[in-house]
Image (cartoon, rainbow, N blue to C red):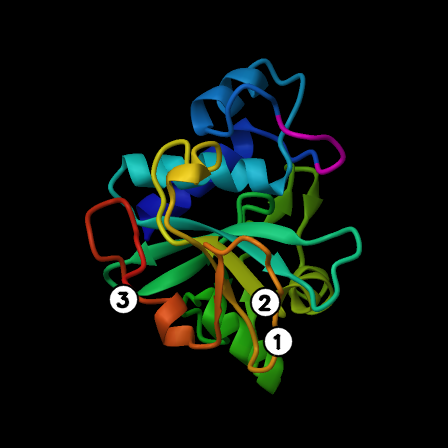
Amino acid sequence: MATIKHILTYIHDKIRHDGQNGNPTGGNNSINFAEACKDGSRGLNCRGLATVLNECYLSMGIPSRVITCMPKRYINDCHVINAVYSSTLGKWLWIDPTNNAWVTDEQGNLLSIQEVRARLRSGQPVRVNEEANWNNEKKTTTEEYLYEYMAKNLFYLESWTRYGFNTESDYENLINYIFLQPTGCDSKQRNPRNFSVNDDRYFWQPPHAGSCPQLQK
């Protein structure tokens, strides 16, 4: 876990979050994004940060996914974070580069996105880490971040079925985009390669091959 946290904090401190502007053109990958941001003149939105962090983890052999967290009705806001697999804990952990954040239960146990979602739904306690912050300027609090902001953005989740370098640019070569939705909810996606499931176990299945996670159908 120390390595996962150190990489998260490094990227959070190196590239600031800028949710008001688009990401750089020229390739949606960590090399292009980091190059554009290295002089500090600009930042990345939450998806850009999650993309950079994702590829950093993959380069270290740590399975990681970019997860788009969606509200029931999209108006003008959602949030994108990472799910990073801990082989020690046997689960995908909640990791958010925008806020240098991970989430625990009341005993300090690290939680997955699936577990946070279930706890918010059932009223069980969740906590964001003390180090969590926005751009090293504003502390990220449990109440504001989890109960006010993320609670609405966990209605359904989106992810590619596999990840590697430049996935966000080279998506034409991917198998599918997968949606984890409540029973009875239909995203009505027009792309025939996209598909929806309501099985948490399928969506959160462990990685199957090396550092490039891929869901097995």
Instruction: Give whichever of 157, 98 is nearer the camera.
Output: 157
Q: Which residue is mark 3?
A: 90
Splitting the image into 4 quarters, where does residue 164 fall?
top left
- Mark 1 or 3: in front is 1
Sequence-wise, the earlier of marks 1 and 3 is 3
Q: Position of residue 204 (x, y in %)?
A: 37, 67
Q: Dot 3: few (<14), some (14–19), or many (≥20) neighbours within 10 Å?
A: few
* Three-letter residue code for mark 2: Tyr
Mark 2 vs mark 1, CA separation in Å: 9 Å
Name, please, the residue furthest toward the right.
Answer: 75
Give the Cα separation between the discs numbered 1 and 3.
29 Å
Under mark 1, the amino acid is: Cys
Residue 91 position within the rendered picture, expressed as x and y whole percent measured from the top left = 33, 65
Q: Which residues are magenta?
A: 19-23
Instruction: Determine which of the numbered discs, if any, sits on residue 185 in the image.
Output: 1
Q: Which mark is residue 156?
A: 2
Residue 82: mark in rendering: none
Q: Residue at x 24, y 42 (%)?
A: 61
Is 80 on the left-hand or right-hand side of 143?
left
Question: Does residue 93 sit above or below 76 in this rendering?
Answer: below
Query: Mark 1 packing: few (<14 Cα in 10 Å), some, or many (20+)?
Result: some
Q: CA distance from mark 2 to mark 3?
A: 22 Å
Closest to the camera, between mark 2 and mark 1, is 1
Whether the residues at callouts 2 and 1 have beta carbons within 8 Å, the answer is: yes
Label 3: state its secondary structure.
Answer: loop
